[in-house]
Image (cartoon, grey):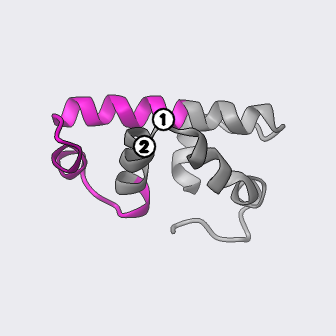
Amino acid sequence: MRATESNPTWELVAPHLDAALGELSESDRDAVLLRYFENKSLREVGQALGTSDDTAQKRISRAVERLREFFAQRGVTVGAGGLVVII
């Protein structure tokens, strides 16, 4: 992962990340894991999911927004862009 423990936002997100990912549908979770944890391109994510690049991007965007909402409900305020950076 690109995040480090010295990042204050990461320290707030890390304890809840597994639970947050568990709240996503399987296809959304797979898309996020492929894109941000395995550093796959949108084309590779789309191929792995059997979708187009555009559909993969939309799925990832939706999933990141759901993750952001999950964290917001737990008092961790982070924008979607910021969340992507730290994961």
Locate residue 43, reporting x and y percent: 17, 46
Q: Which residue is mark 2?
A: 26
Q: Magenta region: which residues?
A: 36-65
Q: Are marks 2 and 1 in contact (CB under 8 Å)?
A: no
Secondary structure, mark 1, is helix
Near mark 1 (Cα within 10 A), the count class, few <14, some 14-19 or many ≥20, is: many
Q: Which residue is mark 1?
A: 63
Residue 53: image quadrant is top left
Three-letter code for the amino acid on which mark 2 is drawn = Glu
Tell whether position 82 is magenta: no
| Residue 73, above or below 14 | above
Q: Main secondary structure of the magenta part?
A: helix
Distance of label 2 from label 1 (alpha carbons): 11 Å
For the point 34% across and 28% down, which residue is it? 58
Q: Which label lies toward us, 2 or 1?
A: 2
Of residues 13 and 21, the one drawn nearer to the viewer in this rendering: 21
**In the image: residue 14, left or right of residue 56:** right
Locate residue 62, reporting x and y percent: 45, 28
| Residue 51, above or below 3 | above
